[in-house]
Image: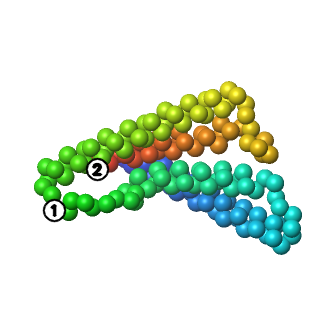
Amino acid sequence: MVLAKMDYLIGKMLELTTAIFLAISVIITFVQVVFRYVLEQPLSWSQEALMISFLYSILFGSALAIKNREHLSVDLFENMSKELDRILKAVEFIVVGVVIVTLFYYGYELVRDNFRSGQIIGILPINKGYVYLAVPLSALFMFYYHVKKVFR
């Protein structure tokens, strides 16, 4: 009961976060076009803010895609035996798991190094570590949903 509620809350939080960052991306793009072409006063910060919001929406959206099994797949072997199907699914599970763990590890390293350096993003006074924090955070959610597939 508690785990089901926690799972539900994590899923809703990811959906909300992805939707918010995607909406921010659309709004910033619209405002950027209006300021650049209508008012002829381009915004200096809009490109960087757009990149950050787009990055977060993509990475958290990827975790949602793993949760909902919506990633692209190709059916090469439609009429294969159940044994071969199990073997290929096990290989797929291991490869995807290794990629997610690698994403988390190097994402963590990237965040740590950027917080240590204190480097900020161009014109915005935001530490790059906060931007790159999306990588290991989304990898944690991806790993959670990836491992959860085994217990379904």
Q: Residues within 10 Å of mark 2 (few under 14, many from 20)?
A: few
For label 1, the residue is: 79
Q: Residue at x 72, y 51 (%)?
A: 48
User: Upstream in the sequence, badge 2 or badge 1?
Assistant: 1
Query: Spatial distance from mark 2 to mark 1, Cα to Cα?
Result: 24 Å
Rendered location of residue 148, percent (x, y): 35, 45
Q: Farthest residue in the bottom direction?
A: 38
Q: Label 1: few (<14), some or many (≥20) within 10 Å?
A: few
Task: Answer with left or right where residue 77 lies relative to residue 34.
Answer: left
Question: x, y (%) of residue 2?
Answer: 40, 44
Q: Is residue 113 above or below residue 66?
A: above
Q: Which mark is residue 54?
A: none
Q: Nearer the viewer, residue 145 or 82?
A: 82
Q: Which residue corresponds to the image point at 59% horizontal and 33% vertical from the top-left?
A: 110
Residue 32, position as x, y percentages in the image: 76, 64
Image quarter of residue 129: top right
Q: Position of residue 108 (x, y in %)?
A: 55, 33
User: Which one is in front in this view, the residue at disc 2 or the one at disc 1?
Assistant: 1
In this view of the protein, which residue sits in the foreground, 10 or 68?
A: 68
Residue picked out by circle 2: 152
Please name the residue shown 20% across and 46% down the image.
87
